[in-house]
Image: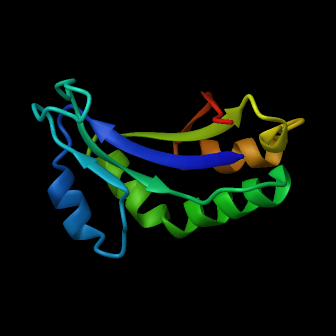
């Protein structure tokens, strides 16, 4: 399974003001500098995450993710102007045959679509559960 998540964060970001300016967003997680997270870690930044979908096969999921990023373009531009870092993390659940992904490739056109709004791309692996 592949889980694309957009993280918007910065040590100086006024996350409440950004979210108020874009009330259509539905973040799955919001944190603020100085707060203690669920694992006891004190956050050194403020931000939020947006779930951009999940599933397979890879190419349709990537295209849907890019469409969702484009739909959020006004917020991405605003967040960048406010000094936020934009990270798109493709989380790969690995370890179970049913969740196996053969290839997750980014064609040049896909990378251009990510570079234009200034999004950093991560690919993370998470252990699966049997």
Judge from the rendering whether residue 48 lies leftward or rightward of residue 69; answer left or right: left
Q: Quadrant of residue 55?
A: bottom right
Outermost residue, right side: 102
- Which residue is rendered at x = 78% and y = 42% of the image? 99
- Which residue is rendered at x = 24% and y = 58% of the image? 18
Judge from the rendering whether residue 13 lies leftward or rightward of residue 105; answer left or right: left
- Which residue is rendered at x = 21% and y = 34% of the image? 37
Q: How many marks?
A: 0
| Image quarter hosting the C terminus | top right
Question: Residue 8 at what x, y percent from top left?
Answer: 37, 45
Given residues 122 and 82, the one toward you in this image is 122
Judge from the rendering whether residue 61 lies leftward or rightward of residue 122; answer left or right: right
Q: Is residue 105 visible?
A: no
Question: Residue 125 at what x, y percent from top left?
Answer: 64, 28
Q: Is residue 115 visible?
A: yes
Question: Residue 105 at what x, y percent from top left?
Answer: 83, 37
Given residues 67 and 39, the one toward you in this image is 39
Q: How is the image coloured?
A: rainbow
Given residues 70 and 3, the one toward you in this image is 3
Outermost residue, bottom side: 24
Q: Is residue 128 above or below residue 66?
A: above
Given residues 28 and 80, the one toward you in this image is 28
Judge from the rendering whether residue 110 lies leftward or rightward of residue 33; answer left or right: right
Outermost residue, left side: 34
Q: Is residue 48 above or below residue 104?
A: below
- Which residue is rendered at x = 44% and y = 55% of the image? 50
Question: Residue 75 at what x, y percent from top left?
Answer: 39, 61
């Amino acid at each position: 399974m592949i889980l694309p998540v957009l993280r918007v964060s910065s040590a100086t970001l006024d996350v409440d003001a950004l979210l108020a300016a874009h009330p259509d967003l539905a973040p799955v997680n919001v944190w603020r500098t100085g707060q203690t997270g669920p694992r006891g870690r004190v956050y050194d930044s403020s931000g939020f995450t947006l779930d951009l979908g999940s599933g397979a096969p890879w190419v349709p999921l990537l295209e849907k993710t890019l469409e969702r990023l484009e739909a959020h373009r006004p917020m991405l531009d605003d967040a960048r102007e406010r000094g936020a870092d934009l990270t798109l993390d493709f989380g790969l659940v690995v370890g179970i045959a049913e969740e196996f992904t053969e290839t997750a490739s980014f064609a040049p056109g896909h990378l251009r679509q990510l570079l234009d709004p200034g999004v950093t791309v991560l690919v993370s692996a998470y252990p699966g559960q049997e």
